[in-house]
Image (cartoon, helix red, strand yellow):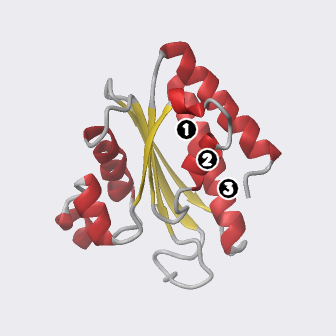
């Protein structure tokens, strides 16, 4: 699943973080650890990759990252607010300098009219207070492709913060 393009993007992120001496944490739901896998696919990544949180359930989002129960109840697991809270939680619960989060509906089921299959929210945050947010509607392109595109988006956001 980590193709040549994703590997190259991960290498760019690692190089940019090394230049600053920064470390990364990931907080992943629908990608199940694929961002961390893309980064750690590259030998020597241990000097940049701090940790990864795979938080598929709401209970895990609350317990491991401190996502407020009220946010999950009011906005849902698939929301911009939850993505931001996940990224903030990854920074709070690790010594990392940068964090990226992903939460969405990869499919093929689970979508609704308000939150269709292929809807994914992202946040990338830095210890110095910068935060990027993205909403992507990939559509019904298949679970594998939604997850691959989500990894690419997350790596791009990390690179933007690291440059």
- Marks 3 and 1 sit apart, C-alpha to C-alpha, by 12 Å
Tag of residue 149 = 3
Question: Dot 1: what SS?
Answer: helix
Q: Residue furthest right?
A: 4
Which residue is identified by label 2? Answer: 153
- Marks 3 and 2 sit apart, C-alpha to C-alpha, by 6 Å
- Is there CB contact under 8 Å for labels 3 and 1? no
Q: Is residue 120 above or below residue 160?
A: below
Q: Position of residue 64 (x, y in %)?
A: 28, 57
Q: Position of residue 80 (x, y in %)?
A: 39, 56
Indicate the quadrant containing the N terminus: top left, top right, bottom left or bottom right. Answer: bottom right
Indicate the quadrant containing the C terminus: top left, top right, bottom left or bottom right. Answer: top right
Q: Position of residue 18 (x, y in %)?
A: 55, 19
Q: Residue furthest top?
A: 19
How many badges with numbers are in the image?
A: 3
- Sequence-first tag of 3 and 1: 3
Question: Dot 2: what SS?
Answer: helix
Residue drawn at point x = 32 percent, y = 55 percent:
81
Q: Position of residue 7 (x, y in %)?
A: 73, 41
Kindly indicate the quadrant of the structure image that contains residue 155: top right
Question: Dot 3: what SS?
Answer: helix
Q: Is residue 108 above or below residue 70?
A: below
| Residue 14 vs residue 134, the one in the foreground | 14
Residue drawn at point x = 35 percent, y = 49 percent:
84
- Is there CB contact under 8 Å for labels 2 and 1? yes
Kindly indicate the quadrant of the structure image that contains residue 74: bottom left
* Residue 57 can be seen, yes or no: yes
* Residue 163 can be seen, yes or no: no
How busy is the neighbourhood of tag 1: few (under 14 within 10 Å), some, or many (20 plus)? many
- Is there CB contact under 8 Å for labels 3 and 2? yes
Which residue is identified by label 1? Answer: 157
Q: Is residue 79 above or below residue 37?
A: below
């Amino acid at each position: 699943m980590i193709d040549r393009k994703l590997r190259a993007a991960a290498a760019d992120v690692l190089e940019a973080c090394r230049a600053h001496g920064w470390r990364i944490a990931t907080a992943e739901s629908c990608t199940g650890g694929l961002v961390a896998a893309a980064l750690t696919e590259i030998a020597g990544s241990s000097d940049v990759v701090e940790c990864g949180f795979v938080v598929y359930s709401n209970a895990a989002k609350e317990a491991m990252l401190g996502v407020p129960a009220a946010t999950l109840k009011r906005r849902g697991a698939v929301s911009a607010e939850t993505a931001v809270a996940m990224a903030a939680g990854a920074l709070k619960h690790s010594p990392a300098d940068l964090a990226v989060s992903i939460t969405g509906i990869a499919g093929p089921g689970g979508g609704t009219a308000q939150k269709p299959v292929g809807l994914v929210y992202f946040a990338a945050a830095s210890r110095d207070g910068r935060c990027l947010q993205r909403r992507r509607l990939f559509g019904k392109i298949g679970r594998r492709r939604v997850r691959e595109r989500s990894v690419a988006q997350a790596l791009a956001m990390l690179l933007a913060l690291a440059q």
